[in-house]
Image (cartoon, rainbow, N blue to C red):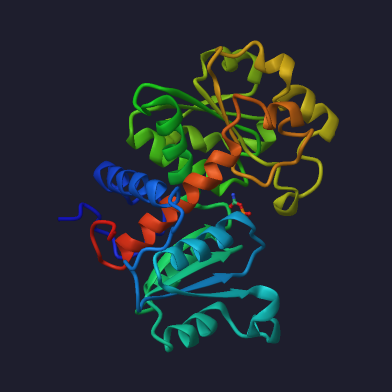
Amino acid sequence: MSTFGPRHLLGIEPLTRAEIETVLELSGRFLEINERPIKKVPTLRGKTVINLFLEPSTRTRTSFEIAAKRLSADAINISGSTSSTTKGETLLDTARNLDAMSPDVVVVRHAQAGAAEMLAGRLRAAVVNAGDGAHEHPTQGLLDILTIRRRLGRVEGLTVGLVGDIAHSRVARSNIHGLLKLGARVIVCGPPTLVPAPIERLGVEVAHRLDDILPRCDVVNVLRIQFERQRNGLFPSIHEYALLFGMDSARLSRAKPDVLLLAPGPINRGVEVTPEVADGPHSAILQQVSNGLAMRMAVLQLLCGRTGAEE
Ligand code: CP
């Protein structure tokens, strides 16, 4: 009996701890399948997954496509530039026309917060939120948590620092909801202009000096400065941001000896993180991508209503 109740995955906020645990556990089984010479299983044969990405993506779109194909589902990719949204069609009209072709899952990324939820109320297909504005990016939050658990063996009791552009980050919100539900302590840290004060109400600690909180962190998740969502002048210069909040070797040496470094990607090398840290032994950046593929396989399987990975 599956302990995953929702028909859609719109965020981590609505999930129970048991539902998060179900996704994490099933992801582990798909990680094993992804290590096999033959990685395809028949679990979702006959199912159709549409990836409707109206904002750019490398990791999320590609991993949903590979996830669907490894489960033997048909995967169709639609981007903003190749869809009829460029001719003025609304998101809802586009999605309803796709829904008329009877897909089982529509994975949607959109610049507007609430876009996935709006579609979930109107489509027959299950909807996965692959990022809606600055609201949530649930599969990124889940893969970050999966990576922490696999590298450190637990989430409960850990202190996780989310560093950088909290204001514009859907990844931050999904991490916060998931980590708190699993018993971690969360510190959000960045310049005051990039950390909205009300975020404290979610149950996180707010800090503005990375060097003060770093020695307490078991995990540091460095969030990209989202230049595309910002108006100008939120901090004096990229150079100053990198000096105060960038993870470089000197700063890393003042962290816990086994601190884990995460970054959702894409990263601005030399801004949030220097190349030697991004590519160094504390970094799990590429492991996050591998874990994300397995976790998205788990999500597709759970939403398509099957239980247990078929061999
Ligand atoms: N982390 C993330 O969502 O990456 P993409 O924008 O490449 O999908």
Q: Residue at x 53, y 58 (%)?
A: 63
Q: Residue at x 59, y 45 (%)?
A: 169
Side of 20 where 218 appears, left or right: right
Which of the 4 quarters of the picture holds residue 157? Answer: top left
Residue 163 in the image, given as x and y percentages of width and height: 61, 31
User: Is residue 78 or residue 163 the one in the foreground?
Assistant: 78
Side of 46 where 193 appears, left or right: right
Q: Is residue 99 visible?
A: yes
Side of 50 where 305 appears, left or right: left
Q: Residue at x 38, y 29 (%)?
A: 155
User: Is residue 285 or residue 84 the one in the foreground?
Assistant: 285
Residue 84 in the image, given as x and y percentages of width and height: 64, 85
Extreme residue in the front direction: 37
User: Is residue 71 or residue 5 the one in the foreground?
Assistant: 71
Q: Is residue 28 above or below residue 311?
A: above
Side of 300 where 217 appears, left or right: right
Which of the 4 quarters of the picture holds residue 298? Answer: bottom left
Q: Residue at x 73, y 14 (%)?
A: 250
User: Is residue 56 or residue 203 the one in the foreground?
Assistant: 56
Q: Is residue 147 above or below residue 152?
A: below
How many dots with numbers? 0
Can you say which quadrant of the picture contains the C terminus? bottom left
Residue 162 in the image, given as x and y percentages of width and height: 56, 32
Q: Is residue 294 above or below residue 125?
A: above
Can you say which quadrant of the picture contains the N terminus? bottom left
Q: Is residue 191 visible?
A: no
Residue 5 in the image, given as x and y percentages of width and height: 24, 58
